[in-house]
Amino acid sequence: MEKLLGLIMAGLPLIFAFGFLVPVIMQGMAAMEWQPPFGLSTFNFALFLGGSLGLLAQVRGRWI
Amino acid sequence: MEIAIARKHSGMFPWEIVVWAFGNMAVWLALWPLVIFDVVPLWLGFLIATVNMSLVYLPTHDAQHDIVARPGQKLRWLNELVGHATTWMIVTPFEVFRVTHLQHHRHTNDPQLDPDITSMASGPINAIWRSIRERQPDGKRTNDYLAAVARAGREDLIPIALFYKLGHVAILCLLAWGGFALEAFFLWWLPYHIAMVYLTFFLSWAPHHPGNEQARYRNTRSWKSALGNIGSMGMQFHIVHHLHPYIPLVRTPAAYREMRPILEARNCRLGKI
């Protein structure tokens, strides 16, 4: 159990990014009535932005 | 004389702290339906939630020191309830707070053994930055807390602490994908992080700054806060708390005023207050 928790903790930045940041970006854009650039759908844009931030945090060990 | 003053200001039931603990939690829980059903706008909910998050810690702090009731006393259950029922809001088990905080008292400002040593910083801006930096995945603070828990022989708390962290993320994700991402973000995630900066600044950095002395009468101080006693959550008188941790938070200003000449004589670090 502890091992499993440790494994999940190790991947937490990515889990947080795809599980939380992506919908926050999507719903934030919808609330502000912002259109994503380059003809992307809101979902794809949020996936790209949130996923990139999460990947960076996962690799660097910090968000900022 | 010092002990006599401390005793005079302790031992009473701190009803204010109990009302504070549960009232604060009730307001924060009520915010969710009020915001979701548009009774309260999200921006206002965010402001109130930030205050709520900032108010969670201090009642549990009194409970950590058994101030509501000591072991064996009739209201001991209430002491434990104040702690356990509220710390989940700031994503840390009560027992982890208790064990690490008692280690902080035992080893204040010790670079190796004080679990709060990562709060130390050269100035206020640096203290705020450090608080944010220490909550990143590679921050040292989490490791210091885990090490303090292990040193206290309470490794059993480590999986519980991890469970709290993962549970928090799981709830945020469920809310977000359920259509309440902005509510989760502005009522919990962001208020929590702002509150942690505020709490680290006023409860840890400011009262110990510069944090380079470990002697009992020198390891913390009194200081005058620009935000006053309420804005700094009573921490202007933190020296009294470190010397006599059984005094309820709401009684530390009165105890300090009475004790001040003695503290002066003991060469304590006293501000203009």
Image (cartoon, rainbow, N blue to C red):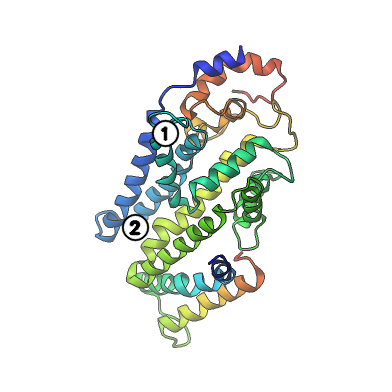
Q: Secondary structure at mark 2?
A: helix
For mark 1, name the chain.
Answer: B
Q: Which residue is at a point 43% across and 22% down the rendered structure image?
A: B12
Mark 2 = which residue? Answer: B42
Same chain shared by disc 2 and disc 1: yes
Q: Which residue is at a point 35% across and 53% down the rendered structure image?
A: B45
Q: Quadrant of residue A60?
A: bottom right
Of callouts 2 and 1, which one flags the residue occurring earlier in the amino acid sequence?
Answer: 2
Rendering coords of residue B224 (x, y %): 59, 29
In the picture shown, does residue B85 fall above or below B176?
above
Query: Spatial distance from mark 2 to mark 1, Cα to Cα?
Result: 38 Å
Rendering coords of residue A5 (x, y %): 54, 67
Say if residue A32 shows up in the picture. yes
Mark 1, residues whose alpha carbon is within 10 Å: few (<14), some, or many (≥20)? Answer: some
Mark 1 = which residue? Answer: B76
Say if residue B198 shows up in the picture. no
Q: Which residue is at a point 49% across and 63% down the rendered structure image?
A: B166
> Which residue appears farthest toward the front when viewing the image?
B72
- Give, as a three-letter code, the residue at label 2: Leu
In the picture shown, does residue B2 fall above or below B199?
above
Q: Considering the image in quadrants, where does the N terminus of chain B appear?
A: top right
